Image (spheres, rainbow, N blue to C red):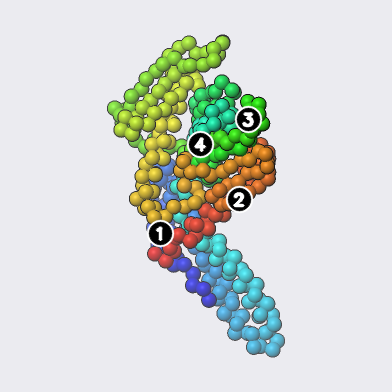
Amino acid sequence: MEILPNIEPFRSRFHELEKQLSLPETFQDNQLASETSREHRRLSGILELHDKIQSFENQVKDCESLIDDPEMGNEAKSEILMLTTNIQEYKEKLLVSMIPPDPEIGKNIIVEIRAGAGGDEASIFASDLYRMYTRFAERLKWSVECLSQNNSDTGGFKEIIFILKGEDAWSKMKYESGVHRVQRIPVTEAGGRIHTSTSTVAVLPEAKDVEISINPNDLEINVCRASGPGGQGVNTTDSAVQIQHLPTGINVYCADERSQLKNKNKAMTVLRSRLLQKKQQEENEKYAQNRRSQVGTGDRSERIRTYNFPQSRITDHRVNYTSHALQETLMGDLEHIIEILEKEELSERLQNINYNE
């Protein structure tokens, strides 16, 4: 019978956490208590699955001793078949549960969409992507808050940055980072020729103050008057804020609010998340120089998906998945793509992990 993964490191860690949870000082720090309890629940589930498999295997041994019994033999064989099916099902659950959890699970996310190659058509496509994501968020009852936007003359976006707040926002949206390509006849094209345009999407987990410490001396903050199309809505006060993080050269500009303080807070939210992403990318480079996952790399330079309007086709190049539900997808139905990407990522993580360390 197939040998189970080594459970002892998990059992040892479980007992450590039980001792930690019995200490009053653990609950004096709310974040520590929450993280400890969450890990304890996860390990408890792993141990329960492992113990259940062992129980099934012991029952199989008991049944095997009855196979030659003239009265009980047939019933024992049927029982063995059922138990073997249960063992395989629970082993798959156990392997999945033993994968280290994504540390960003449960976080809100910041999404940045920028028009790429293609001029006005690229900015229109950027607005299409924004609409797709906001409708997807509505389906899942997430909240959407715009942090910054730069409109184009054609009604699209040169750039738009927004935050999605929802329990599974990161786990669903992390696959969207990269270059999105559209092939269609632009509304401005008189000759009926198909154009190819691109927009880039970056998905960043919202960084907490405890994760990223920013030295105020490393910031150069400038205020200016927000630019706009004019009219009653134009901002005539110096409320726009631009923040540059001097050590990294990262720039953030925010002018959506009439309040300078609100714009500064929004800009700092984006800056923290970009710095966290940079830190994570540097750490990943140390451990993954020779192993590049096809799914969820978060590389904004990677071409990930093509939206072909003439053929009503959408293709995700990372998993060679093609669907003709283009319009439904643009209306916010992303689940059919996300499910394929989740399965691919899970398969890769199962192959890359060593449970017997």
State which mark lies toward you, 1 or 3: 3
> Which mark is first along the chain, 1 or 4?
1
Label 2: which residue? 321
Q: How many neighbours does mark 2 have within 10 angstroms: few (below 14), some (14-19), or many (20 or more)? A: some
> Which mark is first along the chain, 3 or 2?
3
Q: Amino acid at mark 3?
A: Pro
Kindly report the distance in space between the C-alpha atoms of the residues bearing marks 4 and 1. Answer: 42 Å
Label 3: which residue? 186
Disc 1 is placed on an element classified as: helix
Q: Amino acid at mark 4?
A: Thr
Q: Look at the numbered discs 4 and 1 and tell me whether their residues touch, using CB distance below 8 Å.
A: no
State which mark lies toward you, 2 or 1: 2
Residue positioned 52% across, 53% down in the render: 345
Q: Which mark is residue 200?
A: 4
Residue positioned 69% across, 89% down in the render: 70
Residue positioned 40% across, 59% down in the render: 13
